[in-house]
Amino acid sequence: MITVEIRNLIKTFSETTAIDNLSLDIEKGKITGLIGADGAGKTTLIRLIIGLLLPDSGEVKTLDLNPFTQKSELTPKIGYMPQKFGLYEDLTVIENLWLYADLKNQPYEFDKMLEFTNLKQFQDRLAGALSGGMKQKLGLACALLGTPDFLVLDEPSVGVDPISRKDLMKMVRDLINPETTVLWSTAYLDEAHSFDTAVVLDKGKVIYNGRPHDLSSTSKGFEEKVIELMGGYKKEDSLIAENYKPISSDLNCTVEAVNLEKKYGNFYAVRNNSFCINRGEIFGLLGPNGAGKSTSFKMMCGLTSPTDGTAKIMGIDILENPEKARSNLGYMAQKFSLYGSLTVRQNLEFFAAAYGINFSDRKKRVDEIIHVFGFEDIQEQKSEDLSLGFKQRLSMACALIHNPPILFLDEPTSGVDVITRRDFWNHIISLAKKGVTILVTTHFMDEAEYCDRISLFYKGETIAVGTPDELKQKANADNMEDTFITLIKESEKE
Ligand SMILES: Nc1ncnc2c1ncn2[C@@H]1O[C@H](COP(=O)(O)OP(=O)(O)OP(=O)(O)O)[C@@H](O)[C@H]1O
Ligand SMILES: [Mg+2]
């Protein structure tokens, strides 16, 4: 039985062909994973399947309906979680669930959802005050309400921590019935093992359609095989780092936090956080969703004031001298925070001006950044139209535009494909070699290995600090994922 039947589908946007003569069947009652690089066409395909976009030519039939002309019949049968799920930020967690239950005529039975998502104790918190990963889980819970025939999830696990990510697939499998078809797009290749079928998309074409097992059973392993399918990754010298002015400093700690604390009412988002990061060091902040990583970043940048403690950037107190401190750092926020209606070039120009690059140097610097990031072809595109991966690249470019000695990167690789992730880390490591101090968060445990030191953060507090090897030893584990899980469980017991 087939839930979606696609024949010779074509969809173009001005000059780019997003979907290129694509044919595909999506089987009923199966979980089909849609895997592909940024800009491969995943979101476009999803939108065509559920009738949010009209194809140029070709045919789509979803649940035997034409998704465009029979949309009103189709919509109630579909549970859809877009990349940016529409939570009501000024409603609480539970109010959001009530609202979506009402919209879908469902009873107020959320116990299992709240349990799974770890949101039970936070049900009266405003959705806008949740961490990025917590929002993602609430969005998924809302999309799962009711019993849709067809569940469509566009990158549901972006930003979800490794422990919860394991539960996510379980949650979906538990909450749907055997008849439900699921289409699940992802950039996490390790997730693909749990799909029934894996469809790999590249440049708007299906380049693999089969059991995920057959992708991983090659001698090269899964990740390498997918990279090969996508055209391969060749590590090159980082042009970004090459063009960077070297950073020298006699400071002991280029980034320093002393007893940082952030309290909301009686709740400690961050408590007693102290660290000293040296010049040229890559310092990773790891921890489950809601641990307080982004809150720490925001305090370090002066975007939110701590309720106690101090933070210094290149020896300058961020509270006493925020402007001077900030001129020394580049910050890439977890949530895309550029100007969507401005083009790529305009965003770069804006940030160049905001960071105080004087007018005569600005154009040269922007041209240079466009060149090193390979933005030549997209510089006139509006940033809101970029794929997630390109948005992340642009955010990073904006953070680097003034050549800062310190970089704060809050989940720079969430939602980007494997090839881009490798490329990002190539740049990050090369920048550190130039003397740039880097504070970074990630939910990819393989990336944690690239850090010189890691601080493991849980419920607002540091539970372990050390090199990746030191932490592994402490947890008696041979990989970072087990280390993460073990150390958090141990701290839970205490
Ligand atoms: N304005 C606020 N009011 C109440 N609680 C808040 C507010 N802002 C953040 N919090 C809470 O502080 C905690 C830490 O959030 P933070 O965003 O720092 O987590 P995180 O470690 O970055 O998580 P993620 O991995 O999901 O990005 C969460 O429980 C969050 O809900
Ligand atoms: Mg965060």
Image (spheres, rainbow, N blue to C red):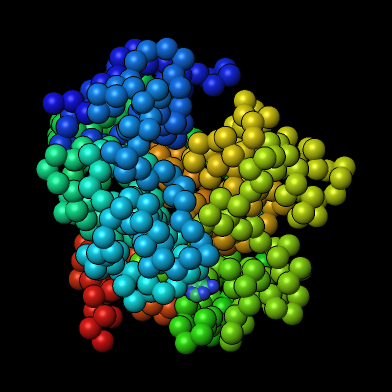
Quarter of the view holding residue 453: bottom left
Q: Position of residue 352 (x, y in %)?
A: 75, 48
423 versus 1 height, above or below: below
Residue at the image position 35 percent from the left and 43 percent from the top: 80
Would residue 177 be visible to someone looking at this image?
yes
Quarter of the view holding residue 487: bottom left
Quarter of the view holding residue 41: top left
Residue at the image position 31 percent from the left and 72 percent from the top: 120
Q: Quadrant of the C terminus?
A: bottom left
In-image side of 123 versus 1 (left or right)? right
Would residue 484 be visible to someone looking at this image?
no
Q: Quadrant of the N terminus?
A: top left
- Residue at the right extreme of this rendering: 360
Residue at the image position 59 percent from the left and 47 percent from the top: 395
Q: Position of residue 4 (x, y in %)?
A: 26, 26
Q: Position of residue 427 (x, y in %)?
A: 52, 46
In-image side of 362 versus 461 (left or right)? right
Q: Position of residue 314 (x, y in %)?
A: 67, 70
204 versus 57 height, above or below: below
226 versus 309 height, above or below: above
Q: How many marks are shown on the rendered structure?
A: 0
Residue at the image position 34 percent from the left and 76 percent from the top: 121
